[in-house]
Amino acid sequence: MVRIVLHGPESTGKTWLANLLAEHFNAPVVEEYLRIWVNLQNRLPDISDIPEITFNRLKLESEISRKNPSLIICDTDEWTTCVYHTHYFNYLPEWLYDLAKGNDGLFLKKYQNEEWMKNPDFLWSSKTLYLLTDTDIPWESDPQREGEQFRNLIFPQFKSILLENNLLYETISGSWDERLNACIRAVNKFIHQ
C-alpha cells in the first residue's frame, strides 16, 4: 500500500489537496481527525486530549487500510502532531515520537487489544510520500487557525521534522492549480518508481 501524507502548517491547502487527490486517484482519504474532534468537542484540545485524538486518527487510517487499498491519502499524520505538540506544549513526548517513527512504544501497547490494532503494521510497512505544503498562498481565516504569521513561523519545523527523520517528501508550492498539478506529478512518480 502507498500512503500519501499532506504535511504542513494551517491554511496551506492540505484538506483541499487531499480531497482532490483522492478523487483524481480514486483513493480513500484519512481525514484530519483534530478538526473532527474540535467540531465534536466545540473547543481546542489541551495536552490531555492528544492521546485520544491520536488514537482516533490511527483508528480512521486502520479502518481504511484494512480494506486493502493500493493507495490512501492522509490529511496529516503523527509527524504533524509532533510539530504542533512541540510548539504548543513545549516538548515532544516519547510515546508520540516513537509512534511517528514506527516503534512499538507505550501507546501501541495500551491499545493493542483494540480490534483496529490487530495489525498495526499498516502504519509502517507502507511506502509513504509526504507532500509538504508551502505558505505561499493567500491566508484563509478559520476559527480553528492561529494566524498567518504563525503559519510562516512554524513552516520550518514541518520541513525539519521530515529532514531529521529521513522521510521522503516533495515541497508543494505555487497557485492552487500549480499545487494540485505538482501533487499529481509527485504521486504518479512515487507510485511508479
Image: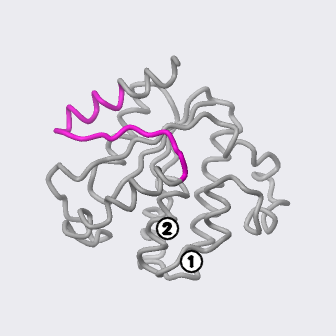
Report crowding for label 2: few under 14, some 14 to 19, many 20 or more residues within 10 A (C-alpha). some
Q: Secondary structure at mark 2?
A: helix
Please identify the quarter of the rendering in which residue 153 is found.
Answer: bottom left
The furthest residue to the right: 113
Q: Which amino acid type corresponds to the residue marked 2 in the rendered image?
A: Trp
Q: Position of residue 172 (x, y in %)?
A: 30, 40
Nearest to viewer (mark 2 / mark 1): 1
Q: Nearer the viewer, residue 142 or 77?
A: 77
Q: Position of 66 compared to 48: left or right?
A: right
Say which residue label 1 marks.
Answer: 49
Q: Which mark is residue 136?
A: none
Indicate which disc residue 37 carries. 2
Q: Is residue 39 above or below residue 61?
A: below
Mark 2–mark 1 Cα distance, whole angstroms, equals 10 Å
Identity of the amino acid at label 1? Asp
In percent of width and height, residue 108 lies at 76, 62
Placement of the N terminus among the 4 image quadrants? top right
Q: Is residue 182 magenta?
A: yes
- Asked which colour scheme the image uses, the reply is one colour
Bounds of the magenta span?
Answer: 165-184
Q: Are marks 2 and 1 in contact (CB under 8 Å)?
A: yes
Looking at the picture, does residue 33 appear above or below residue 166?
Answer: below
Q: Residue at horizontal 66%, vertical 59%?
A: 99
x 28%, y 32%: residue:
180
Where disc 1 sits, the SS reads helix
Residue at horizontal 39 percent and vertical 25 percent from the top: 24
Height in image: 176 above or below 117? above
Q: Earlier in the sequence, mark 2 or mark 1?
A: 2
Q: Indicate yes or no whether the magenta region holds residue 27.
A: no
Q: Residues within 10 Å of mark 1 (few under 14, many from 20)?
A: few
For the residue pair 68 and 76, the one nearer the viewer reads as 76
